Image: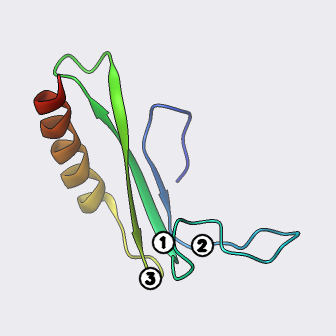
Amino acid sequence: MQEAAGNRGICAGWRRHPKTNEATGAFHTTRSEIVVPMRNNDHQRILGMMDVESDKLNAFGEEDREFLERAGGLIAHCLH
């Protein structure tokens, strides 16, 4: 699942850059990634994005997304 900016995204199978054949994640071992917004309490303002990566294929699912969105909300509350 990949969604528009400001929404969440799960990348289950990591791909390599087509021209350089290099992994496009933060780490060369990344095979899965999930990105969630850190929103303020009224969900109107994004204060940052949380990017979590794994070396396991298909490492993240809906339960992970829900947990990370809640954690991102708590972090955003602390930052605001």
Q: Are marks 2 and 1 in contact (CB under 8 Å)?
A: yes
Mark closest to the chain's N terminus, 2 or 1: 2
Mark 3 surroundings within 10 Å by alpha-carbon count, few (fewer than 14), some (14 through 19), many (20 or more): some
Q: Quadrant of residue 15?
A: bottom right
Q: Secondary structure at mark 1?
A: strand
Kind of residue sitting beneath label 2 = Trp
The CA distance from mark 1 to mark 3 is: 7 Å
Front residue of 71/27: it is 27
Residue 47 in the image: state x and y as whole percent: 32, 27
Mark closest to the chain's N terminus, 2 or 3: 2
Q: Are marks 2 and 3 in contact (CB under 8 Å)?
A: no
Kind of residue sitting beneath label 3 = Asp
Residue on which disc 2 sits? 14
Mark 2 surroundings within 10 Å by alpha-carbon count, few (fewer than 14), some (14 through 19), many (20 or more): many
Can you say whether 66 is above or below 11 in the image?
Answer: above
Front residue of 10/74: it is 74
Can you say whether 60 is above or below 49 in the image?
Answer: below
Asked if residue 20 lies left or right of residue 61, the reply is right
Residue 17 in the image: state x and y as whole percent: 77, 68
The CA distance from mark 2 to mark 3 is: 9 Å
Residue on which disc 3 sits? 55
Q: Secondary structure at mark 2?
A: loop
Residue on which disc 1 sits? 32
Kind of residue sitting beneath label 1 = Ser
Q: Are marks 1 and 3 in contact (CB under 8 Å)?
A: no
Q: Secondary structure at mark 3?
A: loop
Front residue of 28/72: it is 28
Residue in the picture at 19% in, 54% down: 67
Residue 3 in the image: state x and y as whole percent: 54, 41
Residue 35 in the image: state x and y as whole percent: 42, 51
